[in-house]
């Protein structure tokens, strides 16, 4: 049962700090999931986690705190970029529990060329 939810919404395009706010909220680790519900793989969230600069594009910031992450409907997933991002996060020592909604749009190399 959902008892509590924090929602970070912004009506602006570009880096306005949504990822930093979500990262700050996730630090308390009281969430059952961190969900990204809209946007493409071109998003960029620059996070400073334990003194390290980490840039994510698709994986929600819950990954930094071992909170399950969901890429929800309305998102566009670039499979190659997602693979590279997951590899980078593993190299930084994070275990990412990622779920992708079956209604997400997927882009491949063929779409981008």
Image: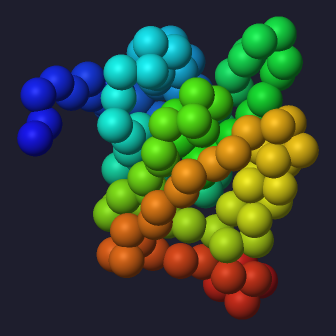
- Considering only vertical position in the picture, is 36 above or below 8? below
The N terminus appears in which quarter of the rendering? top left
Asked whether, in this view, residue 57 is left or right of residue 37, the answer is: right
Asked whether, in this view, residue 82 is left or right of residue 93, the answer is: left
> Residue 51, located in which quarter of the rendered image?
top right
Q: Nearer the viewer, residue 52 or 106?
A: 52
> Residue 111, located in which quarter of the rendered image?
bottom right
The structure residue drawn at horizontal position 84% and vertical position 18%, both measured from the top left corner, is: 52
Colour mapping? rainbow
Decide if residue 14 is in sight here.
Answer: no
Q: Residue furthest bottom?
A: 110
Residue 56, how many percent across, how many down? 69, 40
The structure residue drawn at horizontal position 44% and vertical position 21%, both measured from the top left corner, is: 29
- Considering only vertical position in the picture, is 39 above or below 100? above
- Considering only vertical position in the picture, is 39 above or below 77? above
Residue 15, how many percent across, how many down? 58, 27
The C terminus appears in which quarter of the rendering? bottom right
């Amino acid at each position: 049962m959902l008892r509590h939810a924090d929602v970070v919404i912004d009506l602006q395009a570009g880096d306005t700090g949504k990822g930093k706010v979500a990262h700050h909220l996730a630090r308390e680790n009281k969430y059952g999931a961190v969900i990204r519900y809209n946007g493409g793989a071109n998003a960029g969230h620059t996070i400073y986690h334990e003194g390290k600069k980490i840039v994510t594009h698709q994986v929600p910031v819950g990954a930094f705190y071992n909170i399950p992450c969901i890429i929800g409907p309305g998102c566009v997933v670039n499979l190659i970029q997602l693979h590279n991002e997951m590899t980078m996060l593993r190299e930084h020592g994070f275990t990412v529990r990622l779920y992708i909604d079956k209604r997400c749009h997927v882009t491949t190399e063929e779409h981008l060329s």
